[in-house]
Image: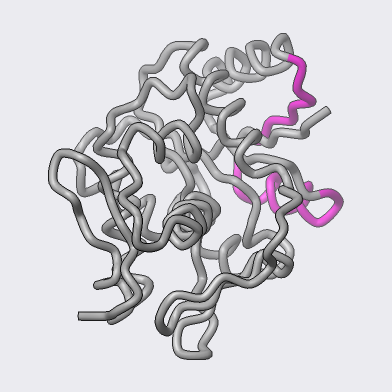
Amino acid sequence: MALIYIVEDDISIQEIERFALSNAGYQVEGFASAEKFYEALKEKAPDLILLDIMLPDEDGLAIVKKLRSQRETVSIPIIMVTAKTTELDKVKGLDIGADDYMTKPFGIMELISRVKALLRRSAPAQEKDRILRSGSVVLDRGRHAVYVEDQPCELTYKEYELLKLLMINAGIVTTREVILDRIWGTDFEGESRTLDMHIKTLRQKLGNAGSMIKTIRNVGYMLTEQEM
């Protein structure tokens, strides 16, 4: 049974989320502050974190940065929840390490769908080739690590899976539909713009190597072997 931590200071919202996810078969623990969350994290790491941006003692974005800077928590899937609605807010959240983004108010079925999809995609995969190489980019499946020009490149879970899919299909166009299905799941009901934002942040983190990710207009994306 997957363990989910909910970090939400609005107790009424937290209770609704806990009730819904518990009924969906998950083990759930809720925290109204960053302090309580950190205390629980020291005892046991969850399989997924549902994190509100606006907390009384620490900004949710700052929490994500801390989690992504520590080996023990760098790969824990994170869904950010906020009342903010601008695209800039979404890009910022994804850029610092969140794997998905939900804007209040949202439906319970959408919440469960996002959680299921993210947990499914974060499950360890048994794959044949451990090392993938494209240009100056090396992806080590065994270590769940990415290196660019022999330097570590920190990616979120979604960015890592997106890069892996493109590297496996290097030189071949991968359609938007296939990417959304493989990375977000068949029950994903969010905007396709989510994919574009992840591609943008992935390119930025890869530096010059990011130019290998080509946009095929109205079709999808393709990874080439040559940097521009």
Q: Residue at x 44, y 11 (%)?
A: 107
Tell me the quarter of the picture where residue 78 sits: top right
Q: In the image shown, does 40 or 133 lie closer to the viewer?
A: 133
Up the image or down, 160 lies above or below 117; here it is below
Query: How far across and how far down the image is residue 27, in percent?
Result: 79, 25
Residue 163 is covered by the magenta coloring: no
Figure colour scheme: one colour
Name the residue furthest left: 217
> Horizontal placement of 82 versus 79: left or right?
left
Viewer can see residue 64: no
> Horizontal placement of 151 versus 177: left or right?
right
Q: Residue at x 29, y 64 (%)?
A: 213
> Horizontal placement of 123 versus 15: left or right?
right
Q: Residue at x 37, y 74 (%)?
A: 206
Name the residue furthest front: 172
Q: In the image shown, does 59 or 196 lie closer to the viewer?
A: 196
Q: Quadrant of the C terminus?
A: bottom left
Q: Residue at x 74, y 64 (%)?
A: 72
Up the image or down, 34 lies above or below 79; here it is below
> Horizontal placement of 35 versus 13: left or right?
right
Viewer can see residue 199: yes
Q: Quadrant of the N terminus?
A: top right
Query: How far across and how far down the image is residue 58, in percent?
Result: 50, 53
Up the image or down, 63 lies above or below 111; here it is below
Q: In the image shown, does 27 or 82 lie closer to the viewer?
A: 27
Q: In the image shown, does 32 or 127 lie closer to the viewer?
A: 127
Up the image or down, 124 lies above or below 108; here it is below
Query: How far across and how far down the image is residue 48, in percent?
Result: 66, 40
Total count of labels: 0
Tell me the quarter of the picture where residue 53 sits: top left
Q: Which residues are magenta?
A: 25-44
